[in-house]
Image (cartoon, rainbow, N blue to C red):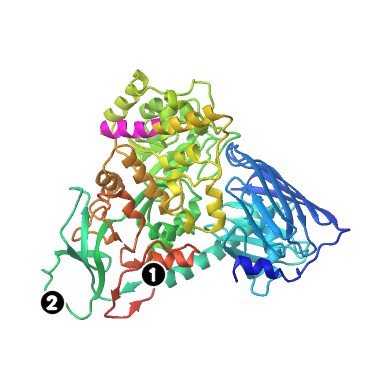
Amino acid sequence: MTIKHMLLAGFAAATVSLSAAQAETLKFTLLQSNENVGHLTGEIDGNTVKVDYFVDQNGRGPKHAETLRLNKDGIPLFWSVDGTSLMGGPVAEQYEWKNGTATWHSQADDGAVKAAAPGIYIVNDGSPWSLDVYARALLSDADRSIDVLPAGRIRLEELQKLKIKGQADGTVYRLSGINMAPDYIALAADGHLFAKFSGTSVVVREGFEGMEAELLKLGAKLESERAEALQTRLAHRFDGPVRIRNVRVFDPKSGELGVPSTVVMMDGRITGVLPLGSEGDYSADQTVIDGEGGTLVPGLHDMHSHTTLTSGLYYLAAGVTSTRDMGNSNSFLLDLMSKIETGDLAGPRITPAGFMEGRSPYSENRGFVPETPEKAVEAVNWYADHGYWQIKIYNSMNPDWVPAIAEAAHKRGLTVTGHVPAFSTANRSIEDGYSEITHINQLMLGWLLSPEEDTRTPLRLTAMARAAKLDLNTEPVKHTIDLMRKNHIAHDPTAVILERLMLSRAGAVPPGDVDYLEHMPIGYQRYRKRSFVKLADQAADDAYRGGFQRILDTLALLHKNGIRLLPGTDDTTGFTVHRELELYTLAGLSPAEALRLGTLGCAEYLGNDKDLGSIERGKRSDFFLVPGDPTKDIRAIKTVRMVVRGDTVYFPTEIYDALSIEPFTTAPTVTAATAERGTQ
């Protein structure tokens, strides 16, 4: 059913109607890794709901008030949101259905549509209370699937009952179609939201905070079951050799494409790269894939990921076959890595970095937060014992502890990277034992801030506007780069995240998202079209734009000075990996240079270039197929037709279809000589 038809037809009566006399207050606690990071309160008075939403996590978080006016079936007639978003940007959103017309205004867009009856509007800057509204509307639909405004379709799946101590059982649902990952929610017996849970975060009714661990365990179980089902459905494995014919192979060493060739693989290894026409006859047990003259590129790396259960398919669909996890729940990550390697779950090869943070009001609570230097050394040894490759240090770490941490890490064969601890500098971190600085803002802040300014706050991001006036020829800049060159310090810029922060503007598609955003679910599309920083006037706007240009200038300066750049995103999708590499070309690198950084360069840094990073006989078959030539236009890597990760073949068209994303291209023709093997 289309939006137009749905709105003209109206909705069936809701299962639970609101009474004009009904009045109650529902309070929720927001928990992140067992820390209270905010609250949500809904005051229901008849058909009006007043919502207060407050989040303060590591100095960031939305803070706003909502007003909803509902009809007797619980469908919004009016919805307003006023306050600030994640980084403090202003929010003033309003939706209204009146006299047969639905109108809305948000950071993302403005719109109006004729509608004989009110429909469900997907709020752009809403709170978890929105899930209560959507779920109740979906429960009134026989198919539990409805078209929504401004566009798209959402779906509700009932999964199981939930025991709630002292209460009647609740019901757990999966709500999909809004964002890139589904929401797991529980409704109480009163028909309203009881909890939302995913990853390491929980929103739960006040008084039931003790259920956090149970809810997170349940969320992980449900999402794991979904991920395993998707892997079974989307992973293709073939007995016998697989021949990928008529392709040109990108060689990151020369930066050039080879002659038209056939690449042969067997059991996860490349067994031949043969000029097209020279292959001779081959046995009938082989599967043949027609590359149609496209380009085969070694698998990309994301050197700054925070892995989730849902990130694996997004990465693979974009040709990202290796990641470095830069901080996670240790138990979750180790379990996930094991399941990926056995083939139970889809995902790139993961190199883990062990997260370490200091205790402060701004602490990021993941990995270890040691209370003493001795406990910090114990944490280093734990990471070494469990096979971690590196230690990552975060903002609140006491800089005086860094030398001991680095010494312990080096003794165990681990390197050290991370943020520059608050009230320290990149120079000091290098001298204290860092092998790498992560985030280009962390590198540049030492040139922009005075010693007393606190980078545990969002200042570590918003201060980048000052870079507009930075002279890169000054002595402080030269000294840092000299230190990096002398000590062979690598850099993981995550420039794409700074671009999103500094250049996103309300109502506009950000420059890094133009090539894919319209393919995404409606909630994600609208989320991207917003301002993330406060822009008081044109001067502030100009400062952020100028500051980002200086970031690109810094990337060019680092590359010119031989500093190894490690493409990373601080995200969980391959779309941002593509943009990170594209930004390097905007900084002056050639497409081939950027591709080398994202393929063989990362493999060399991680020490696994004998197996990965290029397409050669004997190496693992990690690569992807695109129809164009990325050495001429880096954007060609954004239309991936096929991805191979070891012995498994994926077709992004199938992945995106399963994830409610409009595919970007078509799959190649496969002539399978034998039946596919299962994923187990």
Say if the magenta span includes residue 560: yes
In this image, 602 relative to 388: left or right? left
Q: Residue furthest right?
A: 21
- Residue 55 seen in the current view: no
Secondary-structure class at tag 2 = loop
Name the image quarter holding the N terminus.
Answer: bottom right
Q: Residues within 10 Å of mark 2 (few under 14, many from 20)?
A: few
Question: Identity of the amino acid at label 2?
Answer: Asp
In this image, 154 relative to 189: left or right? left
Q: Which residues are magenta?
A: 550-561
Q: Which of the pair 537/477 is nearer the observer?
A: 537
Secondary-structure class at tag 1 = loop
In this image, 343 relative to 211: left or right? left
Which residue, given by chain and number where applicable, does mark 1 sit on? 235
Which of labels 2 and 1 is toward the front? 2
In this image, 523 relative to 605: left or right? right
Give the spatial CA distance, label 2 vs label 1.
28 Å
How far from the left and from the top, in percent, is residue 678? 38, 75
Q: Which of the pair 352/568 is nearer the observer?
A: 568
Say if the magenta span includes residue 297: no
How far from the left and from the top, in percent, is residue 194? 71, 58
Which residue, given by chain and number where applicable, does mark 2 sit on? 281
Q: Main secondary structure of the magenta part?
A: helix
Choose top left, top right, bottom left or bottom right for residue 316. bottom left
Whichever of callouts 2 and 1 sits on the residue coming sooner in the sequence is 1
Q: Is residue 474 above or below residue 460?
A: above
Question: Identity of the amino acid at label 1?
Answer: Ala
Residue in view at x 48 percent, y 38 percent: 503
Q: Residues within 10 Å of mark 1 (few under 14, many from 20)?
A: many
Q: Which of the pair 678/55 is nearer the observer?
A: 55
How far from the left and from the top, in percent, is residue 486? 27, 28
